[in-house]
């Protein structure tokens, strides 16, 4: 039988790369024979989930035979109260990733354009290209999204501009002036998607309060997640804040039960656990300062970050990624993230940071 899947596939899908999540410790152990690796590559919370979330999942398991709430009402109400945003403006999603897919399904078709930074988080491009839209990539300036250049790239077929703040993979943010410039410079019928997956880590007091702008502008869509500081990446839950007509459009294309019962319960509990949030924030703050010092002592330059990861320049160590891997530290190679000559390192807990420090000092001859 000569089955030719290429003839069946849509052209857009044929040309699409498969998302690469980076290597797991198990893979590294199998392929390179290095046991006991630490993974500092996916910007997860090294503290783990909130104990309240774990308890809520245990409880929710008893009802695993029942479909989850398709509208995620309790979680939306909790978010509404926390954020001061109406429930009719909140859509809970299967990770923030699903929000990018839903935006693409609902709004994009062949010939449409989406403007993004270059590099930026890859899911925006995958979602847009799946629908046949063209992705216009605007190079960063000084590791920051170049908002004026992104606005200049907007033309007749542009349906969306995506800003990510803090930006993955550099950890830089969009300023209040830039956000205002984006909103005042965008045509009325273009969506501004602002991905704030790492918002809770930001410690720059000048960082804009996006909700203030969101309240006044129906073009704005804000995406957030429980995968990062809330430590629930494995349960897949995030949310989009959007104007009611946009939410209704997204609801039409989402799966009916897109967020499972355990994820809804965990997210609702995690939202209540202020202490866990603060511990996670503090651990990251301390780890960041410690890592800055180690990098400086090792002669490695880096981009100051507002997130839970740091972009480090390879400098005199072009194979820094492999050298770390051989020492049992998995980070992300910049080449795979569209920023060759760098590695992106997730800030870990004390033990992980210590192992990273020892590896860096070994590589750089810093003692
Ligand atoms: C900038 C950014 N947005 C969104 C996501 C996806 O988050 P989720 O796990 O909620 O799909 C990530 C995950 O790494 C990310 O870095």
Image (cartoon, rainbow, N blue to C red):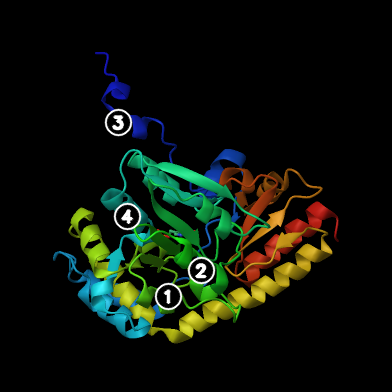
On the image, numbered disc 4 is attached to which residue?
103
Check contact, mark 2 vs mark 4: CB within 8 A.
no
Q: Separation of disc 1 and disc 4 at Cα?
A: 20 Å
Task: Compute the Cα span from label 1 to label 3.
Answer: 38 Å
Viewer-nearest residue: 109 or 268: 109
Decide if residue 94 is on the left or right side of residue 144: left
Kindly tell me whether residue 50 is visible in this rendering: no
Disc number lying in front (3 or 4): 4
- Residue 131, relative to residue 208: is it above or below? above
Q: Label 2 crowding class (10 Å Cα cut-off): few <14, some 14-19, many 20+?
A: some
Disc 2 vs disc 4: which is toward the camera?
2
Of 136 and 120, nearer the camera is 136
Sooner in the amino-acid sequence: mark 3 or mark 4: 3
| Residue corresponding to mark 2 | 179
Locate residue 33, reporting x and y percent. 61, 42
Q: What residue do we see at 26% from left, 25% from top?
A: 8
At mark 1, the secondary structure is helix
Residues at marks 2 and 3, CA–CA distance in whole angstroms: 36 Å
In the visual, does 65 lie left or right of 357? Answer: left
- Of the 4 image quadrants, the one containing the N terminus is top left
Label 3, label 4: how far apart the Cα atoms are: 19 Å
Element at badge 2? helix
Sequence order check: which comes first, mark 1 or mark 2?
A: 2
Circles 1 and 2 in contact, beta carbons < 8 Å: yes
Foreground residue, 193 or 276? Answer: 193
Residue annotated with mark 3: 10
Residue 312 x %, y %: 70, 57
Can you identify the residue that label 1 sits on?
213
Estimate the spatial distance between the alpha carbons at disc 2 and disc 4, rounded to whole Å.
Answer: 20 Å
């Amino acid at each position: 039988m000569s089955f030719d899947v290429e003839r069946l596939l849509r052209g857009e899908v044929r040309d699409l790369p498969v998302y690469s999540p980076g290597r797991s410790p198990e893979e590294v152990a199998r392929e390179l024979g290095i046991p006991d690796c630490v993974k500092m590559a996916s910007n997860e919370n090294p503290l783990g989930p909130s104990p309240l979330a774990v308890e809520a999942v245990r409880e929710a398991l008893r009802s695993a035979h029942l479909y989850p709430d398709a509208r995620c009402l309790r979680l939306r109400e909790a978010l509404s109260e926390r954020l001061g945003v109406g429930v009719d403006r909140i859509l809970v999603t299967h990770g923030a990733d699903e929000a990018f897919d839903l935006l693409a399904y609902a709004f994009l078709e062949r010939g449409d354009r989406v403007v993004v930074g270059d590099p930026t988080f890859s899911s925006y491009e995958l979602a847009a290209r799946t629908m046949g839209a063209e992705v216009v990539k605007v190079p960063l300036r000084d590791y920051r999204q170049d908002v004026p250049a992104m606005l200049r790239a907007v033309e007749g077929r542009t349906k969306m501009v995506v800003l990510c703040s803090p930006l993955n993979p550099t950890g830089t943010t969009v300023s209040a002036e830039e956000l205002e410039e984006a909103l005042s410079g965008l045509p009325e019928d273009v969506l501004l998607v602002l991905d704030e997956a790492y918002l809770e880590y930001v410690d720059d007091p000048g960082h804009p309060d996006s909700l203030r702008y969101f309240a006044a502008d129906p073009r704005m869509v804000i995406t957030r997640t429980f995968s990062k500081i809330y430590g629930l990446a494995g349960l897949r839950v995030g949310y989009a804040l959007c104007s009611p007509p946009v939410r209704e459009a997204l609801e039409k294309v989402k799966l009916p039960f897109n967020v499972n019962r355990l994820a809804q319960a965990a997210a609702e509990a995690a939202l209540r656990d202020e202490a866990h949030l603060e511990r996670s924030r503090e651990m990251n703050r301390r780890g960041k300062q410690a890592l800055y010092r180690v990098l400086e002592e090792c002669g490695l330059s880096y981009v100051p970050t507002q997130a839970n990861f740091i972009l480090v320049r390879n400098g005199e160590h072009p194979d820094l990624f492999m050298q770390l891997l051989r020492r049992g530290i998995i980070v992300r190679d910049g080449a795979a993230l569209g920023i060759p000559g760098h590695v992106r390192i997730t800030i870990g807990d004390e033990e992980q940071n210590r192992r990273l420090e020892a590896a860096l000092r070994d590589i750089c001859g810093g003692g």
